[in-house]
Image (spheres, helix red, strand yellow):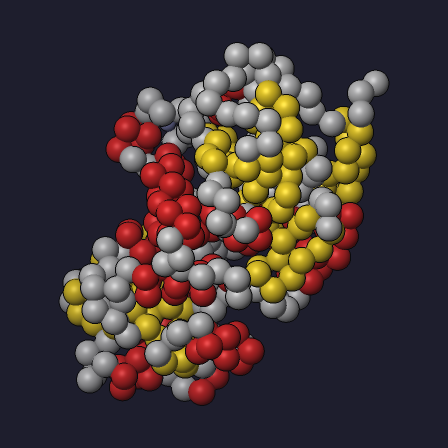
Amino acid sequence: MGEKMLALVFHGPGNLKLDDVEKPQARPGELIVEVKAAGICASDLRVFKGERSAKEGIILGHEVIGTIAEMGFGVDGFHEGDRVTLYPVVSCGLCFFCREGYPSICPDKRLFGFEYDGAFADYMRIPKEVVGRGNVLKVPETISDEEAALTEPLACSINGIETLKLQVGETLLIVGAGPMGLLTMKVARASGAGRIIVSELRKDRLDVARAMGADVVVNPKDGDVASMVKEETDGLGADAALVSIGSPAAALDALRAIRKGGRINFFAGFPPATVIALDPNLIHYGLVTITASQNSTLTQFRRALTLMETHRVELKDIVTHRYPLKDALKAFEGRLSLEGLKYELFPRF
Ligand SMILES: [Zn+2]
Ligand SMILES: [Zn+2]
């Protein structure tokens, strides 16, 4: 029997447990990372709620910073103690979609926290095939653990904005001011967005959006979002909209609030079996482009690190809750209540 460690294990929908599991040991070509911080993602909540599938018995978590604790035989380019983060998408690299630059829709894609054991643990194993693909990236010293654990969501935000083809000076509507909506707002700002309008039902989150630099905040409870956006844009509508919440009302608000020829990114996943009734002429006569993004590419992941290293985005205010790993269930409960923004877990609190 080897050493044990603590890990948050998925035992089926609604069933997460803190288990004592075998501490991984490096086999040839592998890295063992001692986890410093790991963020709870909306996708972890979806797995917990049964809205998204993950392998039973898997350790959740894919937003991670850690240090290399052990190196297997034959690993080059790293040293014990290196601070690293992990690009969690492991795609085949060979299929049509991989070659077209869309690893997230590779049919053979495997994700940490879904198919590979993830980061809500004292240690995580990086298998040989993942080390060999360049998914492990060194983190510059100037980026704190707390921020470095945001590399993956930040990369997703970069993907969200790039998918929208946002132009410098354009007006962007962000629907949903959760952690991802706000993180993406920061990327939009860094990318030269002109006016940023944020729509959100929770007043506390609208206040945060305003404090983080939104030019205009609107609450669907106060009236028609499309009308409010048009009032702010000389009757034109937003150039682009990013839907950062999986609700039909939010998607329809965005569709009606953009200008003719505008673009929409369905950035958040929707619960299974969601149906939206929409007027197709809104799209046809409006010449609307509907697009979507998920995850990120490895190059966007690298650029997320550069954005943090150069302080083009400041992320300290995104992380609102910090928990020791042993209180992971409490952290999930808090995050599910929509209290605050990003929650991070720390094995050594
Ligand atoms: Zn994530
Ligand atoms: Zn592929």
Q: Residue at x 37, y 68 (%)?
A: 174
Instruction: Give the residue displayed 52% in from the left and 12% down from the top.
Output: 74
From the viewer's perspective, tell me whether residue 4 is left or right of residue 341: right
- In this rendered view, identify the residue nearer to me: 188 or 265: 188
On the image, the x and y values in percent for residue 189 come to: 33, 65
Q: Position of residue 51 (x, y in %)?
A: 57, 49
Q: Please tell me whether residue 267 is drawn above or below residue 299 in the rendered image.
A: below
| Image location of residue 147, percent across then percent down | 52, 53
Query: As rendered, which of 326 and 292 lies closer to the eye?
Result: 326
In the shown orientation, is residue 282 left or right of residue 150?
Answer: left
Please state if 173 lies on the left or on the right of 138 as rendered: left
The quarter of the rendered structure image containing the N terminus is: top right
Left or right, residue 215 beside residue 90: left
How far from the left and from the top, in percent, is residue 213?
A: 40, 74
Q: Can see residue 293?
A: no
**Residue located farthest toward the right when viewing the structure as drawn:** 1
Displayed quadrant of residue 298: top left
Task: State the count of labels.
Answer: 0
Residue found at x 39% / y 63%: 186
Give above or below for 289 relative to 60.
below
Q: Is residue 99 visible?
A: yes
